[in-house]
Amino acid sequence: MNETIAAIATPLSPGGIGIIRISGDDAKAIADQLFVSPSGASLSQAKGYSAHYGLLKENGEKIDECIALVFSAPKSYTGEDVVEFSLHGGVFVVKKALRAVLSTGARLAEPGEFTKRAYFNGKLTLTEAEAIMDIISAGGKQALQAANTARNGALYHKIQEITQGLTVAAAHISAFTDFPDEGLPDMDFTLFEENLRKAKEELNRLLSTFDSGVVLREGISCAIIGRPNVGKSTLMNLLSGCERSIVTDIAGTTRDVIEETVKLGEVFLRLSDTAGIRNTEDTVESIGVHRAKERLREAALILAVFDASEELTDDDREILALLADKKSVIIINKTDLPVKMDMDSVKHFKTIQISAAKGTGLEELVVAVNETTGLAALDPNAAILASERQKNCVIKANQAVTAAENEYKTGQMLDIVGFELEEAITALLELNGEKASETVVNEVFSRFCVGK
Ligand code: GDP
């Protein structure tokens, strides 16, 4: 018998309603001790998927009016009997109701424990459970679409498909290694090689989705760089829609790194406005310059700003040189003024033209950032890797398939090839949660919120 658990499922701040969720064998009995229906009906007798108006009372004292939603096992989120009390969304009233539920026999749920029970009761797979947290934290349309795709089982089914291909290959091998003298027909090497090739192709495709998936979910650290006075602060203010950085005509006044997150199209840019990169005698400013260079090294995306109304300077050229091997977009600013800059010098970079002061060119910047970060190529309706855990399993599987292929090609014993294939299959079963250890499962759910 499962212990009955309870938690507040809504945020702990004033709101329209607050919800207490109770799940487990005693959910209805516990709810009945606190819930008083005007008709005298009991929740234990209620049908699943039914809603009931009543009062929540503890030792005869009213806590609040309440709607009780009743779900009967297995037709509930967790697969167990579930009762949800919807109350007025005050912090004190909701906490008081939870205390009453806990003193009536339920235990406080751990983070993610409702979803963990849903997983153990076969209501969803491990990757589908992970997708639920991504739905909750999605900050944009594309991120939500990708999370819903995973919630609907896209990654699970893709991994299952790859596992099946590898299982056929492994079965082929074991037929030969286990029964070498049974007069089996010749091994179909073409099919075997084709299975390994396909598995590697799919695993590599999945791996290629990881980085842009991270950008979609978590945003990207981004540095705006450029020599003083090219318009970095103006651009930053345009992006953030607020006067956060100091904008001034005097060169070198943005002395420190100011961090801010802004949403550009579907991407959250974790931005920093840096001091102009140039050699300077000013000590305070040189700290800023030093930090700016550091930020440039740390940032995953660089927005490098240049002034269209001036000829390229040595500082500009130094900045261009810093961009080698960096994901970057060249922003030619001040295009509202007569253009003096030689555009040929940036023709090898992804370049867009804007006027930060006039607020033009932002759409082009959205497109350029999407292309540079790989988001433009990411299909939110396809299976993508959504966590380090998933990525590590795919890397393990890929390494094992590659080892199997090499051993097979170099004429190693077939049972060594079979062993590598088993390793790959185990990694994929772990990814899908079909053979995941308790530690792995606990780690996944520990990142959930309480009440989910
Ligand atoms: P930073 O030192 O790179 O941060 O440059 P600022 O953002 O402080 O801008 C320097 C000067 O250029 C300010 O006077 C801005 O008003 C001006 N400026 C910035 N962007 C533009 C633009 O697109 N067009 C014009 N004409 N002036 C701009």
Image: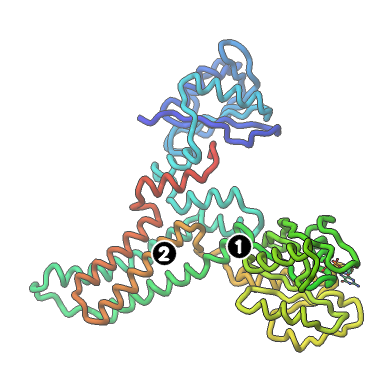
Q: Is residue 361 or residue 163 the one in the foreground?
A: 361
Quarter location, residue 373? bottom right
Quarter location, residue 272? bottom right
Q: Are marks 1 and 2 in contact (CB under 8 Å)?
A: no
Q: Quadrant of the N terminus?
A: top left
The secondary structure type at the circle numbered 2 is helix
Quarter location, residue 394? bottom left
The secondary structure type at the circle numbered 1 is helix
Instruction: Using the rendered image of the protein, determine whether residue 364 is visible from the camera's viewpoint.
Output: no
Q: Is residue 365 or residue 160 the one in the foreground?
A: 365
Rendered location of residue 91, percent (x, y)? 66, 28
Indicate which disc residue 137 carries.
none
Rendered location of residue 139, percent (x, y)? 65, 54
Residue 207 relative to residue 140: left or right:
left
Q: CA distance from mark 1 to mark 2?
A: 19 Å
Q: Residues within 10 Å of mark 2 (few under 14, many from 20)?
A: many
Q: Amino acid at mark 1?
A: Val
Residue at which label 1 appears: 215
Indicate which disc residue 394 carries.
2
Q: Residue at x 83, y 77 (%)?
A: 307
Q: Residue at x 60, y 62 (%)?
A: 215
Rendered location of residue 338, percent (x, y)? 91, 82
Q: Is residue 323 or residue 201 the one in the foreground?
A: 323
Marker count (numbered): 2
Q: In terms of image quarters, where does ligand 1 lie?
A: bottom right
Residue 301 relative to residue 421: left or right:
right
Q: Is residue 384 or residue 317 the one in the foreground?
A: 317
Seen in the picture, residue 153 relative to 324 is either above or below; the reply is: above
Q: In the orientation shown, which residue stands out farthest toward the bottom?
A: 344
Q: In the orientation shown, which residue stands out farthest toward the left?
A: 181
Q: Residue at x 15, y 78 (%)?
A: 185
